[in-house]
Image (cartoon, helix red, strand yellow):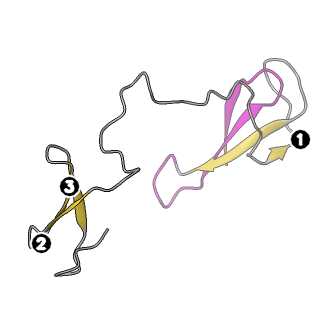
Amino acid sequence: MFCPRCKRLMRPDRGAHVWRCSGCGHTMPLGRGVEVGRSTPAERKVDVVETRTATLPKAEETCPKCGHGEAYWVLRQTRGADEPETRIFECTKCGHKWREYQ
């Protein structure tokens, strides 16, 4: 909602139940269907994802823990900028993580 006088953004005033201009202070009634307030933690919905989705690239690497032949991998700069990256693997079967330095 924008102020009809100065065209600035109007914000809801929780105590007076009106729109109040942030520039000139002009007020307007909230109107029907507009709710002003904050949700309580009990009202918020959080979706819990139980399954793990694969978004990382995969490589044919043997896991040192379980011997599985496939792993996710990422590159991270763990040392100085003049040093090569470190490749970090995670087994697609058991979730074990290990590093490969170049």
Q: Tell me the kind of residue under disc 3.
A: Val
Identify the residue at the far left of this view: 24
Give me the residue at 37% from left, 33% from top: 39
* Residue 51, quarter of the rendered image: top right
Q: CA distance from mark 3 to mark 1?
A: 62 Å
Question: For this rendering, which residue is in front, 14 or 100?
Answer: 14
Of pointers 2 and 3, the one earlier in the residue sequence: 3
Q: Is residue 99 magenta?
A: yes
* Residue 78 location (% of width, % of height): 51, 46
Image side of residue 40 versus residue 77, left or right = left
Q: CA distance from mark 1 to mark 2?
A: 61 Å
Q: Which mark is nearer the camera, 3 or 1?
A: 3
The residue where tag 3 is placed is: 18
The residue where tag 1 is placed is: 60
Identify the residue at the far front of this view: 32
Give me the residue at 73% from left, 32% from top: 90
Q: Tell me the kind of residue under disc 2.
A: Gly
**Crowd class of label 2 (few under 14; some 14 to 19; many from 20; radius 10 Å):** few
Q: Is residue 29 magenta?
A: no
Image side of residue 98 versus residue 12, left or right = right
The residue where tag 2 is placed is: 23
Of pointers 3 and 1, the one earlier in the residue sequence: 3
Q: Which residues are magenta?
A: 78-100
Question: SS class of the residue under badge 3?
Answer: strand
Instruction: Determine whether label 1 and label 2 are within 8 Å by CB.
Output: no
